[in-house]
Image: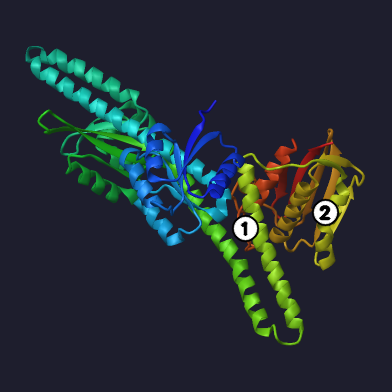
Amino acid sequence: MAPELKILILEDNESDADLLNRELKKSGLSFTAEVVQTRIAFEHALHSFNPDLILSDYSLPSFDAVEAFRIKQDKHPHIPFIIVSGIIGEENAVELIKAGVTDYVSKNKLFTLSTKIDRALNDAKIRKEKILTDEKLKLLNQELLDLNQELEARVVHRTKALVESESRFRSMMETIPQIAWTNTVGGKVVFYNQRWYNYTGLDNGQTQLGGFKTVVHPDDLKTGFKQFRSILRTNDGGEFQIRVKRMDGLYMWHLIRLMPITDQQGKMQLWVGTATDIQEIKLLQQHKDDFIIIASHELKTPITSLKASLQFLDKIKDNPPSPTLSKLIGYANKSLSKVDSLIEDLLNSSMASQGQLHINQQHFVLSETIKECCHDIQVEGVYTIKIEGDMQVKVHADVVRIGQIVINFINNAIKYAPKSKEIIISIEEVNDMVKVSVIDNGPGISPEKLGYLFDRYYRAKNSESHYTGLGLGLYICAEIINKHNGQIGVESELDKGSSFWFTLPL
C-alpha cells in the first residue's frame, strides 16, 4: 500500500483552503493536509510536518508565494512547489516556473490540479533517482581513490594489487544498470562495461575502431562530442543528451553523465561516464507538447468563428430582424457546440485516465436509444441511416454513455467516409452479448493504423478528410465499454468500408 501523501497548504482564505481539500479528496489521492497562513507557521511546518508537496496561494497578507518558495528552496529544494492562484497571470507564472517553481494552477481550473500533482511527484521521483545515481558515482569515485592510495602504499606487491583493483573495478561497473565506461583525461575510452556490448551489439574490436562515433545519431554527433570535450576541460563533471543506436538499429535518447576522479591533492586521474535510457521520458514530453498544440488549435477555430458571429450580431442588433440574424445565431450556436464538445472530451478523457468515469446503469431498449442518436442527422437529409437486426433487445447500461458512443461512431463515418451516403447500424445477439456495429462504405482504414485507433491522442488521417480532432473520442468510447465489461473494435478493408462495433452483456 502506498504511503499517505503529506500536503502543506499555504492559504489565508479558509474557503479557498477548504475548496482545495475537497478537490484533492475528489481526485482520489490518499493524503493528510496542514493549512498555514503566516511565514512563522510555514517555516515551522516545513520542519515538523515534513511535507511531500506544497500548494501555495500567490499573495498573502504577510508575505507571498515567491518568498515562501525561496524559504523552501533554502533547506528543502526537492519538495515540489505548486502555486494555486486566481490572480497570478500567465506572464508571472512563466517567470516563476523559469525560476524553479514546479507548476501553477488557476483557482478557476482546479480540475487540472490532480494531473499536475501527479506530474510534479513523478518529476520529483526522477530527480531523487538522479541524486541517488550521483551518490553512487561519488561513492564509486571515493572507492577508486581509496584503492589508488592502497596501491601506492603497497609498491612491493604492485602486480597483485593491480589484478585485485581491476577485478573490483569491473565488479562495481557491472553492477550499475546504465551503460558505463572510463576515459582518460584526454578523452580516450579505456573500458566499457558489459551493458555497452549488450545494447550496441558491437564486439571489442568494433568498439575500439569507432566506439561512440559508430552508434551516436548523425544529427547529435557534432554537438555531443563538443559537449563531451567541454566537460573534460572542467573539474566538475556534467551531462548532456544524445540519441544512441540500439543493436536493432533504433536510436534511443540517453542522458550522458561524466564524473571526475581525482586524487587527494585534487589532481585529475580518470573520468567515469554513464549513459541512462530516457527515451520514455522524452516521448511523454513530446506527447504532452503535441497535445497542447493540437488542443489549442482545435479550440481556437470555433472560438474565432463564435467571436466573428457575435461581432456581426453586435453591429446589426439595432436593425430590424433579417435572415442574416438567424444565420449568425446558427453559426454562433454551432461554434459554441464545438467548444462544448471539445471541453467535454477533455474532461471525459481526464476522468477515464484516472478511473473516475461515472456509469449510471438502467434497463432500456437499445434500438430506441440508437434511433434518438440518429434523429438530427436523418433530418438534414444528406445521409441515410438504416437500423437493422434485433429491435426489441434490452440492455442494462448507461443510456447517455451508449448514445455517446453511437454518435461518435456515426460522426466518424461521416467525417472519414463523406462519400458513403448510407450508414448501416446492426444490432445482433452474439454469445450472451449484444453487438452493435456502425458500417460505412467509405475508403476503409489501412491495416497498420487499426491497432492504434483506440489509443489516447491518436488521430487517423486520410485523403478524403482534413478533420483532425483531439484524438480522444475513440479512447473515451473504449473506456466506457470497458466499464460495462464489454468489448470494442473495428474491422476494415481498403476500398470496402469500415465497421466499428461494441458489445454489451445482455
Q: Position of residue 334 (x, y in %)?
A: 70, 68
Q: Quick one: quadrant of the C terminus?
A: top right
| Occupied quadrant, residue 481 | top right
Name the foreground residue: 405 vs 106. 106
Residue position marked by numbered label 1 in the rendering? 469
Left/right of residue 135 with respect to residue 2 in the rendered view: left
Q: Inspect this view and state whether residue 451 appears.
A: no
Residue position marked by numbered label 2 in the rendering? 424
For badge 1, the amino acid type reads Gly
Q: Inspect this view and state whether residue 183 appears.
A: yes
Q: Quick one: quadrant of the N terminus?
A: top right
Q: Position of residue 298 (x, y in %)?
A: 59, 62
Q: Position of residue 179 (x, y in %)?
A: 34, 32
Task: Identify the residue at image location x=37%, y=28%.
Answer: 177
Task: Identify the residue at image location x=12%, y=33%.
Answer: 266
Above/below status of 316 relative to 79: below
Q: What is the basis of the colouring in this image?
A: rainbow
Task: Identify the residue at image location x=77%, y=84%.
Answer: 321
For badge 2, the amino acid type reads Ile
Q: Position of residue 274 (x, y in %)?
A: 31, 34
Above/below status of 100 relative to 319: above
Q: Which of disc 2 and disc 1 is earlier in sequence?
A: 2
Left/right of residue 13 with respect to residue 324 in the rendered view: left
Above/below status of 98 relative to 50: below
Q: Secondary structure at mark 1?
A: loop
Structural distance between the alpha carbons of marks 1 and 2: 24 Å
